[in-house]
Image (spheres, rainbow, N blue to C red):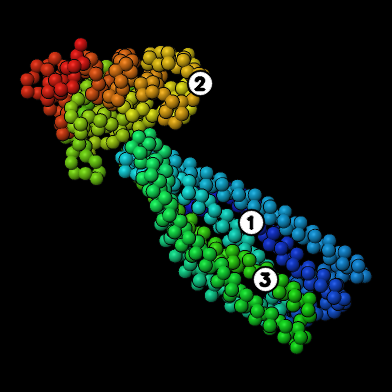
């Protein structure tokens, strides 16, 4: 339940709407009771009972209930009955009938108006608070380190933001609507029932403790099933997301049948879990209703004795009592499902808050300084790194000094630690040992926002958004002049192919830029980096997946982008590496060689010369 109470904190900003919901709920409950209570004088009139007899009988009722009700409440009820009789029951029968019909019509109109207003304000609280919850969860998601996303399935995260939040949303109205409206309705009709006959009303209390025990048992069982159900739904979402993202591979390998079977097995399992949950959820309602009917039958029998034998009740009062009792059954049933919904919401909330409670270890420290500009150098001092789930060091005792404007090339076999070293600079990860200093400041002491604002990153895996070309180039920049976007595109060798597109810079490129070739996508990412105009550039395998023609165009754009910038380059064309100020050869997390291209080629037994002969010589022109 702690998670559920935590959900309710999101409704605090909307306390005015909640207050109005309470007001309209109370008015609805009162008018609901009045509309039923008016059936008593209506039945008396139709059955030709005299007003005096009704007044006498109601006085008898007061006298009979005076032994269990406070005197002030008895007097209040007695005065209300007299005022009502004087106003409604005066005049001949047709006049009385018109007055009663008018009051019933007015009561029902007002009741439904209040129900509408209550529903509107409750919906406002419900959707607004869940918007805030989604927003907070989404903002927190961006604070989590890169490593979290490598270990978490995308479909599972999407499921938590959609399916789990939807379940929580339904529970908000349960708390502020049903938990107020239904008990109030029960109290109003119970008050009517007691005012008519307290003896009969005692039977209504029998059902409460029995139903409560059953409801609690069903709710606890339902919470456990909901956790399993939401996890299975997340699995389905993950498969769907993976299949859509990898549809080309699925078709290329002819795996449609395999994927269909995998998906159908998951949906079949989900279907069985849903049926099991539905059986549990629906169990409390019929049980509660059966118990209510049993009590109702006993009430009818006992009330019939009071009417037919004892004469302490007249027929209209007994029927009014029955109306009141049976009007209590729907809210009692609804309260039976309230606990189920709360338990389901608690289970869903646990999954949402599981993400929000993850404390990002890469964050701004108190009093972190803002980096105004990069002036001098980047220093790696005894930097080591290993992933949380591994004891193997990916980087081990890295010591380098990079001056402003230098080009640093990182080469070496796969798994040597090149990309990891580059990822430490913008603090995608933090070193497990040692320090990285930027102009003498430990980058942990610099705000993440100001640090990354000085950097541009171009990777092998390009990512573009499902919007037009201009907005992709100017990503994160608002109201940017079109001439600057075009200038960046020209520098990135992208302007020509953009101009040939149907709508030029306004052309939509599809999800992840699927309407463009690999080289075109890469040139757009370079144009994006150019427009940002960063002081530090990181290129991570930016041309390794391109054909020769695209590679040449991209390489030209990269060389323009590197001008007057501090650059880290991972395994690019030989021409880039040959122009590097310093080449670092990494193997198993250690720098085993460093120097210029000419210096490293001259080392007969060095790893760089071996890599050069294996990979680069055929490209050396």
* Mark identifier at residue 506: 2
Q: Residue at x 26, y 29 (%)?
A: 422
Give left or right: position of 381 versus 526.
left
Q: Count neighbours of disc 1 (C-alpha within 10 A) and say few if under 14, some if 14 to 19, many if 20 or more.
A: some
- Name the residue beneath numbered marker 1: 22
Return the x and y of residue 193 as percentages of the image width and height.
70, 74
User: Does 270 appear above or below 334?
Assistant: above
**Badge nearest the viewer, 3 or 2:** 2
**Badge nearest the viewer, 1 or 2:** 2
Quarter residue 204 falls in: bottom right
Name the residue furthest bottom.
309
Give left or right: position of 334 versus 531.
right
Return the x and y of residue 455 as percentages of the image width and height.
34, 24
Q: Which residue is drawn at 53% across and 55% down?
A: 171
Count the numbered circles shown.
Answer: 3
Q: Count neighbours of disc 3 (C-alpha within 10 A) and say few if under 14, some if 14 to 19, many if 20 or more.
A: some
- Name the one closer to the observer, 21 or 504: 504
Q: Which residue is drawn at 42% across and 38% down?
A: 244
Q: Which residue is drawn at 21% across and 25% down?
A: 410
Return the x and y of residue 315 as percentages of the image width and height.
78, 79
Q: What element carries label 2?
A: helix
């Amino acid at each position: 339940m702690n998670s559920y109470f935590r959900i309710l904190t999101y409704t605090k900003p909307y306390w005015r709407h909640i207050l109005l919901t309470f007001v309209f709920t109370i008015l609805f409950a009162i008018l609901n009771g009045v509309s039923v209570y008016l059936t008593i004088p209506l039945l008396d009139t139709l059955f030709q009972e005299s007003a005096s007899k009704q007044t006498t009988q109601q006085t008898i009722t007061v006298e009979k209930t005076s032994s269990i009700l406070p005197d002030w409440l008895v007097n209040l009820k007695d005065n209300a009955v007299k005022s009502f009789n004087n106003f409604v029951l005066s005049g001949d029968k047709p006049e009385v009938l018109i007055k009663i019909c008018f009051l019933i019509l007015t009561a029902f109109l007002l009741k439904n108006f209040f129900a509408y207003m209550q529903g509107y304000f409750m919906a406002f609280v419900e959707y607004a608070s869940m918007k805030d919850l989604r927003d907070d969860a989404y903002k927190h998601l961006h604070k989590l380190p890169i490593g979290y996303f490598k270990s978490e399935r995308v479909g599972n995260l999407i499921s938590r933001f959609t399916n789990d939040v939807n379940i929580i949303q339904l529970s908000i109205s349960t708390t502020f609507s049903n938990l107020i409206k239904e008990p109030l309705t029960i109290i109003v009709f119970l008050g009517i029932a007691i005012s008519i006959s307290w003896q009969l009303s005692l039977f209504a209390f029998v059902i409460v403790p029995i139903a409560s025990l059953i409801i609690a048992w069903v709710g606890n069982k339902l919470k456990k099933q909901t956790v399993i159900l939401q996890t299975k739904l997340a699995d389905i979402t993950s498969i769907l997301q993976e299949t859509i993202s990898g549809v080309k591979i699925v078709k290329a390998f002819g795996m449609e049948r395999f994927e269909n079977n995998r998906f159908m097995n998951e949906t079949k399992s989900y279907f069985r879990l849903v049926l099991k949950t539905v059986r549990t959820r629906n169990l409390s309602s019929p049980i509660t209703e059966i118990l209510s009917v049993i009590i109702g039958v006993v009430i009818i029998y006992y009330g019939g004795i009071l009417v037919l034998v004892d004469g302490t009740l007249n027929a209209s009062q007994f029927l009014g009592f029955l109306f009141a009792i049976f009007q209590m059954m729907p809210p009692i049933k609804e309260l039976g499902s309230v606990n189920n919904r709360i338990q389901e919401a608690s289970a869903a909330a646990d999954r949402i808050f599981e993400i929000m409670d993850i404390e990002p270890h890469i964050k701004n420290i108190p009093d972190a300084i803002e980096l105004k500009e990069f002036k001098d150098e980047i220093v790696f001092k005894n930097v080591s790194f290993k992933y949380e789930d591994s004891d193997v060091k990916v980087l081990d005792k890295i010591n380098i000094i990079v001056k402003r404007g230098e080009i640093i090339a990182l080469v070496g076999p796969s798994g040597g630690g090149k990309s990891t070293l580059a990822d430490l600079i913008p603090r995608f990860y933090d070193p497990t040992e040692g320090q990285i200093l930027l102009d003498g400041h430990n980058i942990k002491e610099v705000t993440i926002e100001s640090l990354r604002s000085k950097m541009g990153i171009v990777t092998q895996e390009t990512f573009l958004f499902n919007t037009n070309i201009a907005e992709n180039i100017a990503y994160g920049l608002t109201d940017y002049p079109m001439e600057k976007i075009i200038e960046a595109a020209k520098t990135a060798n992208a302007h020509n192919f953009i101009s040939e597109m149907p709508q030029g810079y306004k052309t939509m490129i599809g999800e992840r830029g699927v309407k463009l070739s690999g080289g075109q996508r890469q040139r757009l990412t370079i144009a994006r980096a150019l427009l940002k105009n960063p002081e530090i550039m990181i290129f991570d395998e930016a041309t390794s997946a391109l054909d020769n023609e695209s590679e040449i165009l991209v390489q030209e754009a990269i060389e323009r982008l590197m001008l007057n910038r501090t650059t880290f380059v991972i395994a690019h064309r030989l021409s880039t590496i040959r122009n590097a100020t310093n080449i670092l050869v990494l193997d198993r997390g250690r720098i085993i060689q460093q120097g210029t291209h000419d210096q490293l080629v001259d080392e007969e037994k060095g790893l760089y010369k071996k890599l050069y002969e294996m990979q680069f010589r055929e490209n050396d022109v």
